[in-house]
Image (cartoon, rainbow, N blue to C red):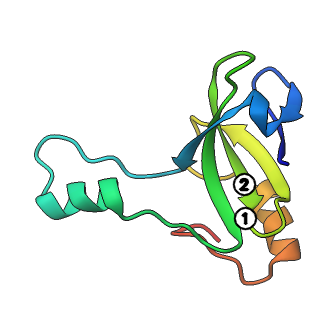
Amino acid sequence: MLILTCPYCGVTGEETEFHGGGEAHLKRFGPGSSDEEFHDYLFSKVNPKGVHLERWRHNNGCGKWFHAARDTVTLEVYGTYSAQTSEPPQEIKDAITAKRPGWSWREFA
C-alpha cells in the first residue's frame, strides 16, 4: 500500500485517504488547438514501469490536489509537492536519480 504525505496539511496516510488523479504535468489544450493536440491530451498518457509523476487529492483531509513521484514497481514514494509547480522540486529529482541513474520522464531528468 502507498503511504503519501499531503504537502499542504502535512497529514501522512495510506492511499485510501487520498484519490489518484492520473498523470501529472500534462499540457492542457483548449479552444483553437488542433485535433492532434487535443487527441494527444485525452489519450496519449505515459504509463511507465518505474518512476511516475502523478496527481493526487487529499479526499479525507484538506481536499487539495498535489503531485507525487513514485515508483510503479516498488511502490516507493520519492516525495510529494504542490500541484501549482510546473516541475518536480530538485530534491525529489535528486532522490530519484540517486536510486535510478539515467532516469527521465517526459521533459524532466
Estimate the x, y position of residue 97 in percent, counting from the top left: 80, 73
Picture residue at 85% right of the left edge, 48% below the top: 1
In the displayed structure image, the side of residue 20 where residue 34 appears, left or right = left
Amino acid type assigned to the residue bearing label 2 in the image: Ala
Circle 2 — which element?
Answer: strand
Disc 2: which residue: 69
In the displayed structure image, the side of residue 109 where residue 21 appears, left or right = left
Marker count (numbered): 2
Picture residue at 64% right of the left edge, 38% below the top: 56
Amino acid type assigned to the residue bearing label 1 in the image: Thr
User: Is any atom of residue 89 visible in this view?
Assistant: no
Classify 103 as above or below 47: below
Classify 12 as above or below 69: above
Estimate the x, y position of residue 44 in percent, counting from the top left: 37, 65
- Residue lying at the far bottom in this picture: please name it: 102
In the displayed structure image, the side of residue 109 where residue 91 appears, left or right = right
Classify 108 as above or below 1: below
Estimate the x, y position of residue 12 in percent, counting from the top left: 89, 31
Circle 1 — which element?
Answer: loop
User: Is any atom of residue 41 visible in this view?
Assistant: yes
Name the mark on residue 28: none
Disc 1: which residue: 72
**Circle 2 residues within 10 Å: few <14, some 14–19, many ≥20:** many
